[in-house]
Amino acid sequence: MKHLALALATAGLLSTALAAPAKKTKPAPAPKMSAQEILAASPASHWRGLDPDNTLLMELPSGQALIELAPRFAPAHVANIRALARGGYWNGLAVVRVQDNFVTQWGDPDGDDPTKARPLPEGASAKLPAEFSVPLDRVGKAAGFTRLRDAEGWAPRTGFAEGFAVAANPKTGKAWLAHCYGVVGAGRSDAVDSSNGAELYAVIGQAPRGLDLNITVVGRVIKGMEHLAALPRGSGAMGFYDKPEQRTGIQRVRLLADMPAEERPALQVLRTESATWARLLDARRHRSGWFVHSPGYIDICSANVPTRPAP
Amino acid sequence: MKHLALALATAGLLSTALAAPAKKTKPAPAPKMSAQEILAASPASHWRGLDPDNTLLMELPSGQALIELAPRFAPAHVANIRALARGGYWNGLAVVRVQDNFVTQWGDPDGDDPTKARPLPEGASAKLPAEFSVPLDRVGKAAGFTRLRDAEGWAPRTGFAEGFAVAANPKTGKAWLAHCYGVVGAGRSDAVDSSNGAELYAVIGQAPRGLDLNITVVGRVIKGMEHLAALPRGSGAMGFYDKPEQRTGIQRVRLLADMPAEERPALQVLRTESATWARLLDARRHRSGWFVHSPGYIDICSANVPTRPAP
């Protein structure tokens, strides 16, 4: 029972209420629906497939990780990452760093040594502009931006767009991808334009929102996150591995578009502009069942966008 | 360089400013100090040792985890956990569940089967009261409660006490330990008083604040968290292991008080009521150096209380 119990707490979505329309007039209480019921009741139109040009398949010894790229937020980096993947840049490279409660980072272990560094493949640029934010007006209807009404301290406005947790500041007119669990970013040096997407990191702990607007976010892991999060932590400074043999090798990284169609993972992602997503969020705000207290609150990093095998 | 760079972003505390006093009148800008400099300048009185009666040493195949208990917040559970450890209850039991971005859970794999369950040792109770919160006035000077001025959405008041992230609600008069990364709680069934501390979990992902006020928090991992967070995720429902052989065995769990003094880890923890901790928090609010944007904000789950070997 205890096993099941904390499990219920875990899933968090098991007991829920339908999202109430945002009206002054109080709606009649809606019948309780579990997350499973909400998802089961979701029409096919609330789900989308993966864009082969914007999805990476990363093969690691323990399994595969799927990374959805964010061309609307980091067009230059995503274009470069496509070229790097097409050129097989990461094949045979390694995870060089795993810092507990922070990031797993991968790339060329010899990247800092010009005499040993693996050359970038044809079509990939060594230098790119910083893409820390985009104009807020670019994250609108086209991106299906749906605002989260719950206020947080990290940004004046938050919501979701194309599956990503988005933060924004109307005063500065900027919008950016929030550093939530599973987000993938491009490592940089001191210069803001020193990242080119060849060295990437994934967030494996508490959302390091302090990185927001300081580094270019290029995507997020939508499946297989455990293959990046459960790796041995590096014992060196800041989680870097002391010895080469401690590193986890990267077998292969491919763009789905470069794989035979029949070999591509057939996954669907819930549309974050859908009513189904709004219902799931509300289910997390208003808990019941195992829960005796309901926070009446949620933030953009505390809800995971569901995926499912394509029907 | 990139390695170093993201590393800087990681540490987050490397560039900092002294905490400005909370006055209306703007103080003169203080000289920049790095986190290392802040810590190096900290007087011995800002650090404390471990209380042998409130610290567990958990031995896992990959290494040791130190868990500091919270008797002020969960007195009955902590007393029971002491009895369980004294009786060697967890020795030879196992980690039964690891759910990515949620919890690592350990206890008796046969705990749900009365015919197979390991009996509780003498002095340990099978039944305890729920300890989801304590009166706010109990978390005062005695606990060295220091309030965080930054507002968040999960609770109307937050701060730190005795190394723990604490949330509170003056309207209800309740204070509770927040579910941040590394927090250890007691699994329960549907009944609020169904936990006894024999089955515990540690948070290994984004702070599941929705669990706050729903389950009894008993402590937090202060060292060796990677030995709980880097374990293979369970492939069964909600992270439970499908097969017994997939579980990670627990070699031994002891209270430091039950170990020979010379064998006890000699660790010190920074006092969260100290000016040094306030300075480190401010260093995270106001970033510089590698950072081009400073959030001017921090929340209770995005800062880790430093520890150091006892001088």
Image (tube, coloured by chain):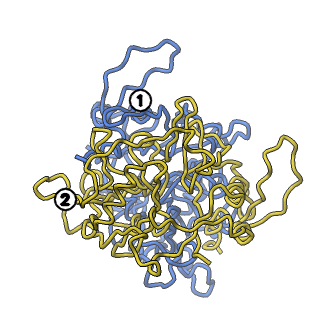
Chain colours: A blue, B yellow
Q: Which mark is residue A275?
A: 1
The extreme front residue here reads B123
Residue B119 numbered mark, or none:
2
Q: Is residue A264 visible?
A: no
Corner quadrant of residue A137: top right
- Residue at the location (48% across, 75% down)? B265
Q: Position of residue A66 (x, y in %)?
A: 40, 58
Residue type at numbered disc 1:
Ala
> What's the mark number on residue B232?
none
Residue type, label 2: Pro
Kind of element beneath mark 1: helix
Give how far across and how far down residue B82 sits, in percent. Answer: 36, 60
Query: In the displayed structure, does residue A85 sit left or right of residue A18?
Result: right
Residue located 67% across and 42% down the image:
A135
Query: Same chain for the residues at labels 1 and 2, yes or no?
Result: no
Q: From the image, state whether disc 1 or disc 2 is nearer to you.
A: 2
Q: Can residue A142 be seen from the camera position used here?
A: yes
Along the horizontal axis of the image, is A256 left or right of B39? Answer: left
Looking at the picture, does residue B237 appear above or below residue A249?
above
Q: Which residue shows up at 33% across the image and 75% down it?
A: B61
Residue A100 versus residue B211 in the image, above or below: below
Q: Nearer the viewer, residue B108 or A151?
A: B108
Task: State the quadrant of the N terminus of chain B.
Answer: bottom right
Look at the numbered disc 2 and give the secondary structure of its residue: loop
The residue furthest left is: B115
**Near-viewer residue (A234 or B79):** B79
